Amino acid sequence: MSRFSAGTRPLLVRSRPWVGVAAVAGAGALLLAGCARGSSDQQSPSFTSRATVSGSLHVMGFGTGDDVGKNRYDRAAAAMPGVKISLSQGELDVQAFLSAVASGKPPDLVYASRDQIGTFASRGAIVPLDDCLASEHVDPSQFVGSAVQQVTFAQHVYGLPEFSTVELTMANKNLLADAGVTLDDVNGSSWDAVTAANKAMAKQAGGKVSVIGYDSKLPEFLPLWAKANGADLISADGRKAQLDDPRVVQALEFAAGIYRDQGGFAGVKTFRDSADFFGKGNQFAAGTLGAMPMENWYVNTLNEVSPSAPLAFDTVRDTSGTPLAFTSGNAWAIPKGAANPQAACRFARLMTETDAWLTAAKDRVSSRTASDQLFTGLLTANKAADQQIRERYVPKDAPEPWKSAIDAIYAANDHTFAMPANPADAAFKTAWQDAVNRVLNGQQEPQAALAQAQQEAQKALDDAWATWDERTGR
């Protein structure tokens, strides 16, 4: 994972082309539904300002397999010499975590995707961090606003955010030129222009796709297209689904139409899934993809495996031309019933503070310089760290197209949005992704698919919120 210097790849990567995202969300919903609600009746722990920490600390869902994670872990461990830290390496096993909470033997700290925090909080699996943050003198405003939104449930912060991914427009400039279109035609500022550019660049051979003109990255990027059209899939308070909003319907019609104009989603997906996505024969290097929105970590993959490919980069833009990115990342949360919450709080603060990120960035720059590779930045979800890393370590004389990529990464990071925390995030995600898949598979038209999804999503939200309101006496 050390090759991704534009921000370490998140534990849950939305855009891996071979992953069925709706299936993953559905599995998550089943896991959550199958577990006990945990110790919601227990009191939240107390935290003492500047307390001396000791004992053991069990961390679940975090590993030191990448250089940025290991660097910060080593620093945090050195600052807590009286604490014996054990890690459950690898991606968080949601069922194992919730089962541990339900059994009364949870880990002391958990590292989770930010979009899981609302459900964990509503089920009583994690505790509010208000007192924790106060004891460690952490101001939540130091973090990117959209990241804080993802970890704020019922007006309480439940997680300390870290890392951010943002989408960029990535394109093959030779295919653009051959088709007589420009980067502005595929950055999303005009859907008519994207549609026309897609038709101009797409090619077939023997009745099969040979060049993808444009990949709108459905199903996972529906929230991006909806937001670009001025709509949110869910209300700001996380209680109302808005999937049948006419602007969401219009967004799905546009993004699905991109595939229809290339002969259908099945053919495009089959072709893109056969690509050497992480290798030197990737679609941009091979000249088989005109343009697509994609997360920023892919910039470094392209820089390393195909540095001479004819690439062009921009932000993704909304229909008024303003940069836009649907952000994601991870967060630290303290489980209900944790045996050592004070040490957990200290560790989370040490892992996310500005100096930790600056030290990690400096070391990464050194390692990449030694291997003659470009450092393109690090998106941390800590605003001060992001700014200082860019000012101190990101090269101002980077060659093109990489300078454009760096500029786009940081511009996108200034224009992020996220869906708010809610108690039914997995079920909600399944509802809209299943709707998109029904459209892509030709089973329903966008309006009908989203109308069905609206009912499914609202029921899931209503049921989950009713349980929360009853538990909290609202």
Image (cartoon, helix red, strand yellow):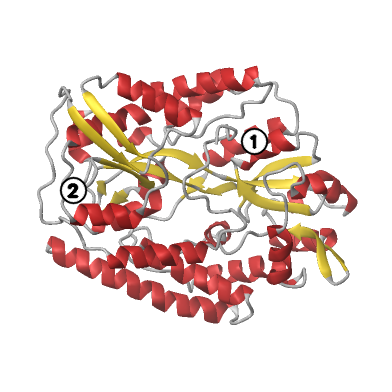
Residue to which mark 2 is pinned: 105
Front-lying residue, 265 or 57? 57
Q: Quadrant of residue 447?
A: bottom right
Q: Residue at x 77, y 72 (%)?
A: 263
Q: Does the rendering let one see residue 251? A: yes
Residue placed most toward the observer, 159 or 69: 69
The secondary element bearing badge 1 is classed as: helix
The residue that appears at 37% across and 61% down in the rendered structure is 425
Q: Mark 1 points at which residue?
A: 300
Q: Position of residue 42 (x, y in %)?
A: 10, 52
Q: Which amino acid does label 2 sit on?
A: Lys
Q: Is residue 374 left or right of residue 9?
A: right
Q: Which mark is residue 377?
A: none
**Residue toward you, 25 or 168:** 25
Give the answer, above or below, for where 36 lies relative to 385. Answer: below
Name above or below for residue 102 compared with residue 26: above
